[in-house]
Amino acid sequence: MNDYGMPIIEPTIDFTKVPPIHQKRTITLVNHFIIHTVTFLNKFALCCEERLFEFENKLQKVEASLEILESRLSSIPETHSKPETESVSNIDSKNEREDVPKADLPTVVEAPTAEVSGKEKINTRPICEDPEYAPFFKMLRVGVLAENVKLKMKENGLDPQMLDNPDHMVPIIEVTHENTATDEDDA
C-alpha cells in the first residue's frame, strides 16, 4: 500500500485472471447516464424555447407599441412642420457629405413654382418628404427590411417602386382658400 492507503497495482498482475465487471451492471450504468443526459437536454431545450417564446411576445408588444406611437406622432400637426424636417435633413446631409466624395452626391433640381389656377399652386419635392411616403422611408432608416416596407405600402395602396428612388420629385398641390364672402355679398 502507498501513503494514501491505496493498493499498489503492480505490472506483474495478469489481467486475464481478473474477473470482468458484470454486463448487467455495465448496461445499467450506461443506461442511467443516457437517461439523465437526455432528460437534462430535454429540460434545457424546453427552458430555451420558453424564454424565446417570452422574448418573442415582448418583441411583438414593443412593435405594436411602436406602431401606435408612430400613428399618434403622425397625427400631431407640429411634427409635420417644415423647419424641423429641414434641420433633420440638414444634419443628415452634412453627415453624408462628410462620408461621400462630392462627385458621388446626387444633384437635386428644384422646379420653379407655377400657377395652375387662382386657387392652386404646384411645387415639387422629393418623394421621401411626401407625407404619404415619409413614414415608409422612416421605417427604412430605422432598420425595417425593404421587402416588409414594400408589403406595407401595397396594403396602404401606394406604389412600392417609389421606395427604390427616394429623390423622385413629386408635385405638391397647395390649395389656397380665397374669401368667398365677397361673392355672396355681391349676389
Image: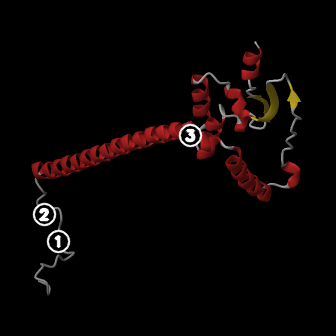
| Residue at numbered disc 3 | 76
Judge depth for marks 1 and 3 and give the one in front.
3
Instruction: Please provide percent x and percent y for residue 171.
Output: 79, 29
Instruction: Please provide percent x and percent y for residue 59.
Output: 42, 43
Label 3: element kind: loop
Q: Is residue 123 above or below residue 81?
A: above
Query: Of the residues under marks 2 and 1, which one precedes in the sequence?
Result: 1
Q: Nearer the viewer, residue 80 or 186?
A: 186
User: Which image quarter: residue 113?
Assistant: top right
With 39 as the anchor, is 170 left or right in this view? right
| Residue at numbered disc 1 | 13
In percent of the image, x 65 and y 37: which residue is there?
134
Instruction: Please provide percent x and percent y for residue 38.
Output: 24, 46
Query: Of the residues under marks 1 and 3, which one precedes in the sequence?
Result: 1
Which corner quadrant holds the C terminus? top right
Give the alpha-carbon distance from disc 2 to disc 1, as whole Å: 9 Å
Residue type marked 2: Val
Q: Nearer the viewer, residue 31 or 22?
A: 31
Which corner quadrant holds the N terminus? bottom left
Residue type marked 1: Ile
User: Which image quarter: residue 56?
Assistant: top left
Query: Which scheme is used to colour this image of the protein?
Result: secondary structure
With 106 as the anchor, is 13 left or right in this view? left
| Residue at numbered disc 2 | 18
With 39 as the anchor, is 173 left or right in this view? right
Q: Which mark is residue 168?
A: none
Residue type marked 3: Ile
Label 2: element kind: loop
In percent of the image, x 62 and y 21: which residue is there?
157
Give the alpha-carbon distance from disc 1 to disc 3, as whole Å: 92 Å
